[in-house]
Image (spheres, rainbow, N blue to C red):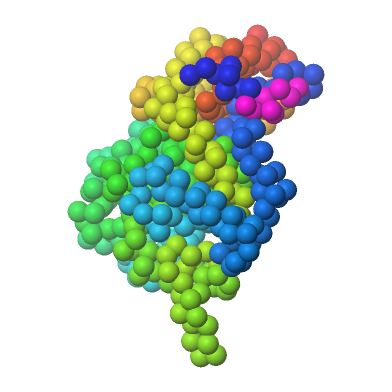
């Protein structure tokens, strides 16, 4: 990978913050956009802005063709069997809520069990917690070991004939832990349970093949993989989606409407009520083309090198606690840490003065934070355009922060 050449495609990386060169290390929250995506958005609004699926005039037909081309690209990217298995939503959160409302409410009842992990983002925690409360079901939570690895033995012990759904993150947004999703799904299916994988932190960073994993549902967001905000994806096996009723109802998700009845549209449009994020769907293809040009295996290797470099640098820096696995083969490009005696929010403010963007807080994973005995943590997360020298800048700034707080 020629990272310097890649960086030339990202206009924001030339930006200066407080007079310092921007060092963007908050990619787990959202990624920056290459000029190819930015130009595609501009082209849509400048040249063929029209609603999709409905018009029989030229620019509407072009918008529809490119929008559906985005769906095809997503299907190929995750190796779905058909583009009909790809539902466009706003984000991974909406994708999970769609499953909770359109499938789980009807299929999970009193004393049924849902298994999640302690690592789940609130998006894959709260919908199931609330569903369990509403339907008198039970939540079972798989823990992590002291290094942040998924406790597979504990997971096996929690599975039972009452398990109706296993909803598990593929890569933790806090610890970076890569869970053994293929094995998790296999064990769930042996008990007759459905499976949902939160791929928000995996699909943008590592090769993901839904047929190989075998999951029933997969949720992820476009904005974490170079595309705009407001476009997310729910993958679902066709035979399951066909049996589900729509979550939202209104325009475009219908085949026929009469005074006394309505017939739903076919897949995938049955689940896409109203005008969608058209430019988001169109630019998913542009973003995926960009990632494919570089190669997902290359991106993964690049992030592993950056993560190892960062972990080694943190280990050689005084007064820093690091959370999650240390083996980069078991970890995504995320390093959560705390500088002893400095609150993460204070640290993030100091780093901002140095032009460095990291995330601080509970990272929408408060159950995990409570489990770790933390109120908050700092997080640096990497992507294809980051460089080792940016980690050097981060480490030097952490040392500077310790001096500001008179800890050195």
Q: Give the residue at x 60% y 66%.
A: 56
Asked if residue 407 is among those painted magenta in the image, a careful observer would answer no
Q: Give the residue at x 46% y 23%.
A: 303
Q: Give the residue at x 63% y 42%.
A: 40
Where is residue 272 shown, x and y percent of the image? 52, 64
Quadrant including the C terminus: top right
Is residue 226 shown above or below 197?
A: above
Residue 223 lies left or right of residue 177; in this view the side is right
Q: Which residue, as the protein is rendered here, is positioned at the far left?
A: 190
Where is residue 212 shown, x and y percent of the image? 28, 43
Q: Which residues are magenta?
A: 9-16
Determine if residue 175 is in view.
Answer: no
Q: Give the residue at x 33% y 63%.
A: 240
Is residue 209 shown above or below 395?
A: below
Residue 285 lies left or right of residue 16; in this view the side is left
Where is residue 235 shown, x and y percent of the image? 41, 53
Where is residue 149 shown, x and y percent of the image? 35, 33
Asked if residue 13 is among those painted magenta in the image, a careful observer would answer yes
Q: Quadrant of residue 392?
A: top right
Q: Nearer the viewer, residue 255 or 101?
A: 255
Q: Quadrant of residue 105?
A: bottom left
Residue 306 lies left or right of residue 159; in this view the side is right
Determine if residue 303 is in view.
Answer: yes
Q: Nearer the viewer, residue 296 or 96?
A: 296
All told, the count of numbered labels is 0
Q: Nearer the viewer, residue 133 or 237?
A: 237
Is residue 66 shown above or below 315?
A: below
Q: Which residue, as the protein is rendered here, is positioned at the far right?
A: 19
């Amino acid at each position: 990978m020629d990272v310097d050449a890649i960086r030339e495609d990202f206009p924001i990386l030339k930006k200066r913050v407080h007079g310092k060169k921007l060092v963007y290390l908050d990619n787990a929250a959202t990624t920056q956009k290459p000029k190819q995506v930015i130009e595609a958005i501009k082209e849509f609004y400048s040249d063929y802005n029209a609603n999709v699926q409905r018009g029989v005039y030229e620019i509407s037909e072009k918008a529809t063709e490119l929008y559906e081309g985005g769906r095809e690209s997503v299907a190929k990217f995750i190796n779905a069997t058909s583009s009909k298995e790809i539902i466009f939503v706003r984000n991974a959160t909406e994708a999970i809520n769609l499953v909770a409302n359109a499938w789980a409410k009807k299929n999970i009842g009193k004393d049924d069990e849902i298994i999640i992990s302690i690592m789940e983002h609130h998006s894959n925690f709260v919908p199931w917690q609330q569903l369990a409360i509403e339907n008198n079901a039970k939540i079972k939570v798989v823990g992590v070991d002291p290094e942040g690895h998924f406790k597979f033995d504990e997971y096996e012990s929690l599975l039972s004939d009452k398990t109706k759904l296993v909803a598990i993150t593929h890569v933790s947004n806090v610890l970076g832990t890569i869970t053994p999703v293929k094995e998790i799904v296999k064990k769930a299916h042996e008990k007759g349970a459905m499976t949902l994988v939160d791929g928000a932190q995996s699909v943008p960073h590592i090769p993901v093949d839904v047929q190989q994993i075998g999951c029933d549902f997969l949720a992820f967001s476009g904005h974490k993989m170079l595309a705009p905000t407001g476009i997310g994806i729910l993958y679902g096996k066709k035979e399951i989606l066909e049996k589900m009723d729509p979550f939202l109802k209104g325009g475009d998700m219908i085949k026929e409407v009469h005074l006394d009845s309505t017939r739903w549209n076919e897949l995938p449009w049955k689940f896409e009520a109203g005008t969608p994020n058209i430019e988001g769907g169109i630019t998913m293809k542009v973003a995926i083309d960009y990632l494919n040009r570089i190669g997902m295996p290359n991106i993964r290797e690049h992030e592993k090198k950056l993560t190892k470099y960062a972990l080694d640098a943190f280990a050689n820096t005084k007064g820093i606690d690091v959370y999650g696995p240390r083996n980069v083969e078991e970890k995504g490009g995320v390093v959560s840490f705390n500088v002893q005696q400095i609150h993460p929010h204070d640290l993030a403010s100091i780093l901002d003065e140095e032009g460095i963007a990291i995330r601080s807080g509970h990272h929408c994973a408060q159950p995990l934070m409570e489990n770790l005995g933390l109120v908050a943590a700092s997080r640096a997360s990497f992507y294809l355009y980051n460089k080792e020298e940016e980690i050097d800048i981060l480490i030097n700034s952490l040392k500077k922060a310790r001096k500001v707080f008179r800890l050195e």
